[in-house]
Amino acid sequence: MRPGFIIGDGAPRLGRRFHLQPRIPFGVFKERTAAAVVSSSRQIDFKDRTDMRAKTAVVLGAQWGDEGKGKIVDVLSERFNAVARYAGGHNAGHTVIIGGQKFVLQLIPCGVLRPGCRGIIGNGVVLDPIAFLKEVAKLRALGVGVDEQLFVSNRAQVILPYHRMIELAAESAPGRKKIGTTSRGIGPAYEDKMARSGLRIVDLLRPELLKTHIEAACGEKNAIAHALFGTDPLDPAQMYDEYAAAAEQVRPFVRDTGRLLNQILREGGSVMFEGAQGTMLDIDHGTYPFVTSSSATAGGAATGTGVGPTAIGTVISVTKAYVTRVGEGPFPTEIHDAVGDHLRARGMEYGAVTGRPRRCGWLDIPLLRYSNQVNGAEWLVVTKLDVLDELEEIPICVGYEIAGKVTDEIPADVQGLEAIKTVYTRMKGWRSSTEGITEFDKLPQEARDYLRFQERESGAKIGMVSTGPDRDQTMLLPEFAAALASLHA
Ligand code: IMP
């Protein structure tokens, strides 16, 4: 046996490829000899990288979140050994309906709903321990195997009550730009991360460190919140007691998840990276400043999990058949009349986290093209097609008129985005029910034309179409199904 052929469980690796059936229970770090530990960390070569790439996919939102990723991740998770969240926190709201039962997951990756699929909360996530434990308890009560399947990165950042305090005060302060956030403390937690003054999960588990961190941070944040916004101070002693107790309940879930994910991949397993929010809410590429504070785009999958970009294969971008947005910020194709209300009512467009009504608009091709470019999206998944069933005519935005010139370039500034006059083409509606249709050829011709137009113009192939909220109301197009099958090869 050549040195360097030791894999995770200490067994010799004999072939170039290590074929495993899906859903093999991976990943326990067993004790190894010093030699094995050293050699296993030198394993990866270019061929391994190619093999890993064939077993990974990023699934993310193309628009401003709420594209229906929860259901898509859930449907696809059947093919993956692990599903990893890489950004955001409990501001996400992933709704999944299984056999009529509704699950709303805010922080925990949808993968855990499949027995045997590992759910991983990566280092790029900001985790509120109290919210996490509430979600865990809810899933436990429903019989989901969270205790065996769920892992939290020791490098993830912790959201503490002063993050929410600062956010609530700043959002309502006179003269401040209101973003319309989810009020979960997400932005201030990422601010602390970047300022190098955040608390990580690994530190949450050390009571002495937690105590001094909370005392120092409360001193500072209470003073700022009081001076700027007149907010009442938080009590650090009470906070410490609550979070020290929560830490003990979080402890069993904590791992070096980057190492765990790389091990799963080295052993031939498959990993899905589950995006949260959407491309246009990304801190760099979205409609800044009306964005969230993390990297929601495909690049975030590498930095947010510790799996290198050369091990990440395809990108699957989820788009609604129309567009929605919650919170403030520019929205070029927003509908301001009764048709918008019709889409909201039919599509049940109310925020899964905050219950706020979502703003509705027409499909925006320049935006989708931009989003596919930023993410390197290969596949498009179109959701909620059935919501358009009753429309006689469906406008699609194909260009932007800015200062008298037609372009498909997305302005970087809010003023530019707000100055857009949208240019539409109109397609004939199908005026019949597509709900629950699971074969592309069974869709009405006009619906197929609508989807093919979207595919042609956006530059990514349609892989899946969703025609209702349930797992079963989904169609996989043959080329995409074949690509997925290779995950098991
Ligand atoms: P934050 O993420 O709570 O800081 O909110 C920033 C912006 O992102 C607000 O406009 C929110 O409405 C929006 N946002 C955050 N998470 C989601 C999501 O999961 N779906 C849709 N919008 C979101």
Image (cartoon, rainbow, N blue to C red):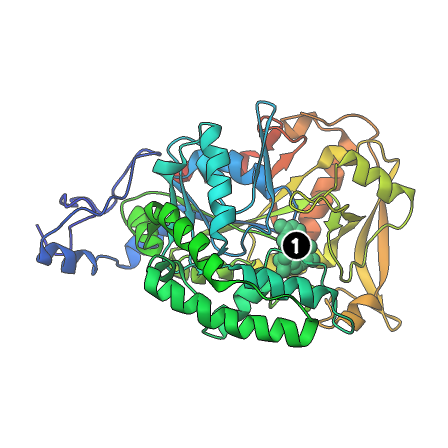
The percent position of residue 171, horizontal first and vertical second, equals 71, 65
Disc 1 crowd rating (10 Å Cα; few below 14, some 14-19, many 20+) is: many
The percent position of residue 131, horizontal first and vertical second, equals 52, 47
| SS for dot 1 | loop
Question: Residue at point 31% right, 33% down?
Answer: 21
- Residue in front for this viewpoint, 481 or 436: 436
Residue 473 in view in this figure: yes
Question: Residue at point 76% right, 47% down?
Answer: 358
Residue 255 lies, with reference to residue 406, above or below; the image says above
The percent position of residue 280, horizontal first and vertical second, equals 66, 59
Q: Residue furthest top?
A: 99
The yes-or-no answer for disc 1 within 8 Å of ligand 1 is yes
Q: Which corner quadrant of the image does residue 469 belong to?
A: top right
The percent position of residue 414, horizontal first and vertical second, equals 76, 70
Question: Residue at point 61% right, 28% down?
Answer: 470
Which quadrant of the frame does ligand 1 lie within? bottom right
- Residue in front for this viewpoint, 357 or 368: 357
- Which residue is labeled 1 in the image? 182
Q: Is residue 201 left or right of residue 453?
A: left
Quadrant of the drawing holding the C terminus: top left
Q: Which corner quadrant of the image does residue 371 belong to?
A: bottom right
Residue 289 lies, with reference to residue 266, above or below; the image says below
Q: Is residue 193 left or right of residue 152?
A: right
- Residue in front for this viewpoint, 53 or 387: 387
Q: Amino acid at mark 1?
A: Thr
Q: Is residue 459 left or right of residue 274?
A: right
Residue 482 in view in this figure: no
